[in-house]
C-alpha cells in the first residue's frame, strides 16, 4: 500500500534557512526552532497526492507541514517570510541568508500551492463519483427490502433478520479496520519524518567522515615531515653541543630549540584533532544504527498495513457473501409467497365449490 521510502528521498526544491515558530503563549514573539541554518525542502507524496514542507534538525522534524490551497507565504522583510499552518496550530518563520533565496522560496511556495489546488480538485471529483455510487447502492438495497410483502412464516423471516444483522456487524468491522488503517498511516507519516531526519544526519556525517579521513591522511604526511624535521634539528643541536661552539652558535641553538618546541606543540594539536575525529566516527556508527532501526520500524509498519489491507479484503468478501445469501433468501421468500397465493386461490375455489354444493 505504501511505497518504499526511497521513492520520496529526493525533494523537488530545497534551500537553507533559519527556522522559527511563533510563541504559542504570546502569539507575537518568535522562538528559534534550529540553532543554525537547516535544509527546508518541498516533497511530493504521490500516494496521497499532497505536497509537504519538511525540515529536519538533527534527528527531530522541525517542520512537517502539508501545503493546502488556503496557505499564504508572506514576506515580512527583505530576508524573512512566514506562513500559518492551521493543522499544527502554529506559524512558521524562515530567515534566509540572501534576498534571492527568499524570493526563490516564495515563488516555489506559490507553484506548490497551485499544484495542491489542482490535486485537491481532482481528488474531490473522484470523491463525488465514489459518493454518488455509494448513495445509489443503499437506495437500491432499501427498495429491495421494502418490496416483498410481510408474511407470517417464522422460518424465512427469521433468516432474513439474521442476514441483516450480519450485514450491520460486517459494516462496523469494516469501519473499525479502516480506522486502524488510518492510524497506521499517521504512524507511517511520523516514521517518514524521523527517517528523513536520520538520512539528513547520515549524509552530513558521511561527508564529515570523508573530509576527516582526507584530513587525517594529510595530517599523517605532515606529521611524518614534522618528525623528520624534528630529528634533523635535534641532530644539529647535538652536533653543536658536541663541538662546543660559541658566539653565533648559541643564537642558532636557541632558534633550533624554539622551532623544536613549536613543532612539538603542533604535533600535540594534531593528535588532539585526530582523537576528536575518531570520536566523531563513533557517533557516526551510532547514527547509522539508529537509521537502521528506523528503517526496520518503517518496514514493520508496512507489513502491518499490508495485514490490515488483507483483513479489509476478507471483510469485503464476507460482506459480499452475506449479500448473496440474503438475495437467495429473498428469492426463496418470494417463491414461498407465490406458492401460498396459489394455495389460497385453490382454497377459495374449494370453498366456493362447497358453498354451491350446500346450496343444492
Image (cartoon, rainbow, N blue to C red):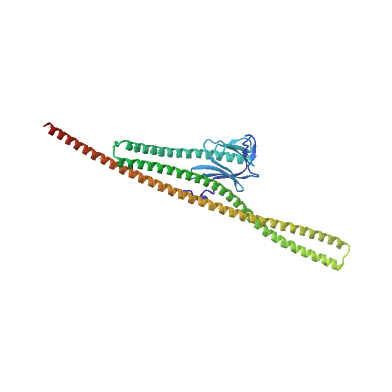
Q: Residue furthest front?
A: 358
Q: Residue furthest bottom?
A: 242
Foreground residue among 269 and 292: 292
Q: Residue furthest top?
A: 359
Answer with the quarter of the image where residue 288 lies.
Answer: bottom right
Answer with the quarter of the image where residue 274 lies.
Answer: bottom right
100 lies left or right of 227: left
State the residue at coordinates (24%, 39%): 340
Answer with the quarter of the image where residue 23 lies.
Answer: top right
The relative height of residue 250 versus residue 317 in the rendered view (above or below) is: below
Q: Position of residue 219 (x, y in %)?
A: 70, 59
318 lies left or right of 39: left
Foreground residue among 317 and 40: 317
Q: Position of residue 346 (x, y in %)?
A: 19, 37
Q: Position of residue 50 (x, y in %)?
A: 50, 42
State the residue at coordinates (69%, 55%): 276
Foreground residue among 44 and 171: 171
State the residue at coordinates (19%, 37%): 347
Q: Quadrant of the C terminus?
A: top left
Res. 339 in view: yes
Res. 47 in view: no
59 lies left or right of 221: left
Q: Position of residue 184 (x, y in %)?
A: 50, 46
Foreground residue among 160 and 35: 160
Amino acid at each position: 500500500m505504501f511505497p518504499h521510502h526511497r521513492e520520496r528521498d529526493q525533494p523537488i526544491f530545497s534551500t537553507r534557512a533559519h527556522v522559527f515558530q511563533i510563541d504559542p503563549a504570546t502569539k507575537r514573539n518568535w522562538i528559534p526552532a534550529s540553532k543554525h541554518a537547516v535544509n527546508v525542502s518541498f516533497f511530493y507524496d504521490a500516494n496521497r497526492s499532497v505536497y509537504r514542507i519538511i525540515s529536519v534538525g538533527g534527528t527531530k522534524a522541525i517542520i512537517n507541514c502539508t501545503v493546502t490551497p488556503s496557505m499564504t507565504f508572506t514576506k515580512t522583510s527583505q530576508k524573512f517570510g512566514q506562513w500559518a499552518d492551521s493543522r499544527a496550530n502554529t506559524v512558521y518563520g524562515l530567515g534566509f541568508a540572501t534576498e534571492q533565496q527568499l524570493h526563490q522560496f516564495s515563488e516555489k511556495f506559490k507553484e506548490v500551492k497551485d499544484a495542491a489546488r489542482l490535486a485537491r480538485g481532482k481528488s474531490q471529483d473522484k470523491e463525488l463519483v465514489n459518493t454518488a455510487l455509494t448513495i445509489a447502492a443503499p437506495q437500491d438495497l432499501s427498495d429491495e427490502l421494502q418490496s416483498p410483502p410481510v408474511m407470517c412464516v417464522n422460518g424465512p423471516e427469521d433468516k432474513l433478520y439474521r442476514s441483516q444483522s450480519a450485514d450491520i456487524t460486517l459494516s462496523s468491522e469494516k469501519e473499525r479496520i479502516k480506522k486502524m488503517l488510518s492510524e497506521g498511516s499517521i504512524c507511517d507519516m511520523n516514521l517518514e519524518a524521523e527517517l528523513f531526519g536520520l538520512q539528513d544526519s547520515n549524509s552530513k556525517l558521511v561527508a564529515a567522515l570523508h573530509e576527516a579521513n582526507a584530513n587525517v591522511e594529510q595530517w599523517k604526511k605532515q606529521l611524518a615531515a614534522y618528525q623528520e624535521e624534528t630529528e634533523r634539528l635535534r641532530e644539529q643541536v647535538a652536533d653543536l653541543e658536541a663541538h662546543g661552539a660559541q658566539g653565533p652558535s648559541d643564537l642558532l641553538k636557541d632558534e633550533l630549540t624554539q622551532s623544536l618546541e613549536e613543532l612539538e606543540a603542533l604535533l600535540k594539536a594534531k593528535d588532539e584533532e585526530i582523537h576528536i575525529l575518531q570520536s566523531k566516527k563513533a557517533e557516526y556508527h551510532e547514527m547509522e544504527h539508529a537509521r537502521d532501526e528506523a528503517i526496520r520500524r518503517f518496514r514493520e509498519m508496512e507489513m502491518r498495513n499490508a495485514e490490515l489491507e488483507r483483513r479489509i479484503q476478507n471483510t469485503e468478501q464476507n460482506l459480499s457473501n452475506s449479500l448473496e445469501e440474503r438475495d437467495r433468501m429473498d428469492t426463496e421468500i418470494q417463491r414461498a409467497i407465490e406458492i401460498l397465493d396459489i394455495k389460497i386461490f385453490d382454497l377459495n375455489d374449494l370453498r366456493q365449490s362447497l358453498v354451491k354444493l350446500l346450496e343444492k
